[in-house]
Amino acid sequence: MAAPTTSVLADIVAGARADLAERERALPLAELKAQLPSARETIDPRPTFRADGVAVIAEVKRASPSRGTLAHIPDPAVLAERYEAGGAAAISVLTEGRRFSGSLADLVAVRRSVDIPVLRKDFIVTAYQLVEARLNGADLALLIVAALDDCELVGLIERARSLDLVPLVEAHTADEVRRAVDAGADVIGINNRDLKTLEVDPSTFHRLAPLIPDGIVRIAESGVRGPHDVIEFARAGADVVLVGEALVTGEDPRAGVADLVAAGAHPALQHPRNP
Ligand SMILES: O=C(O)c1ccccc1NCC(=O)[C@H](O)[C@H](O)COP(=O)(O)O
């Protein structure tokens, strides 16, 4: 049984499950799996995430429950190319349709346009969605601890890896960080946004990052508005920042990413793990 969820997250997960049921009716899991390629074709983002400096994951985000419509993105491939030109380490693509106006078609378009890893950012609660992620070009898949019980979390981490996907396991509380670590995650995102209330509090990352053992990639998600935030998250131990709204609403996505990458690469920023 799934862990109890409330409010916004519960609504989004319920919507995702309804859409999923429709897709599964049209194409059952066994038939979807039959389309999987035999050879490994994904790109492992972890070496880049662990390299010096703070890596930037730039997000294709059209809309959100907290902000409504954010940006008109006629061609996500063009946006992703600009992010890559600015130095992004990976692209996050929101594929949820009801609240974020995303789609698997966006994922496919982005995959075709860039050579860097691509994250399927969605509300993944079944293996079916992981197979879809793999088939549509993702290298990473988001797993939100608050939407899963321990058994589901461990099972989906294992299933993701068996599909050559890197699971990005997202937490928002100390208990969720502990559950992510116990489940064997090696890439953990701390979302500064509470998915039950939608409030963003950057101190969340500062508070929870020390609970993530060394060797696990630490990603600060949500609430990065500019270079200053990258520096603050780097000082708190971030290897990576994941940025959506500030980039899609900014004037120039390439320059926006480049400014964040430059802030994260500043020589004065010594990583607390490698002083
Ligand atoms: O963005 C939302 O309003 C939201 C609401 C409910 C669940 C998830 C939500 N966003 C997904 C994300 O985590 C962000 O898109 C991502 O971290 C980037 O955040 P930001 O840079 O603040 O746009």
Image (cartoon, rainbow, N blue to C red):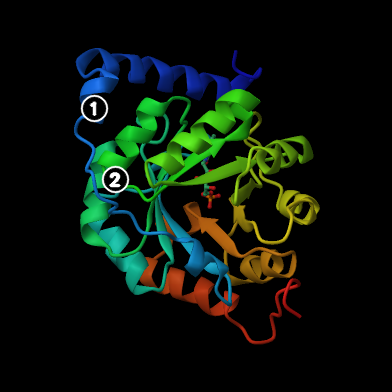
Residue 58: in sight, yes or no? yes
Which numbered disc flags the more N-terminal residue, 1 or 2?
A: 1
At label 1, which amino acid type do we have?
Leu
CA neighbours of label 2 inside 10 A, class few (<14), some (14 to 19), many (20+) = many
Secondary structure beneath dot 1 equals: helix
Q: Nearer the viewer, residue 275 or 161?
A: 161
Residue at point 58%, 31% (across, down): 153
Q: Locate the C terminus and report the quarter of the image it occupies.
A: bottom right
* Left-right relation of 191 to 32: right
CA neighbours of label 1 inside 10 A, class few (<14), some (14 to 19), many (20+) = some
* Left-right relation of 28 to 241: left
The circle on residue 109 is none
Q: Nearer the viewer, residue 243 or 32?
A: 32
Question: Given the current orientation, which residue lies at the most extreme bottom position?
Answer: 267
At label 2, which amino acid type do we have?
Leu
Label 1 residue near ligand 1, CB within 8 Å: no
Where is residue 18 drawn, in percent x and y? 38, 15
Secondary structure beneath dot 2 equals: helix
Against 96, residue 61 (above or below) is below
Where is residue 47 drawn, in percent x and y? 49, 67
Residue at point 56%, 68% (across, down): 50
Where is residue 99 drawn, in percent x and y? 42, 30
Where is residue 252 drawn, in percent x and y? 37, 68
Residue at point 66%, 47% (across, down): 192
* Left-right relation of 267 to 55: right
Q: Nearer the viewer, residue 143 or 173?
A: 143
**Quarter where residue 41 is shown:** bottom left
**Quarter where residue 255 is shown:** bottom left
* Left-right relation of 43 to 78: right
* Residue picked out by circle 1: 32
Residue 102: in sight, yes or no? no
The circle on residue 107 is 2
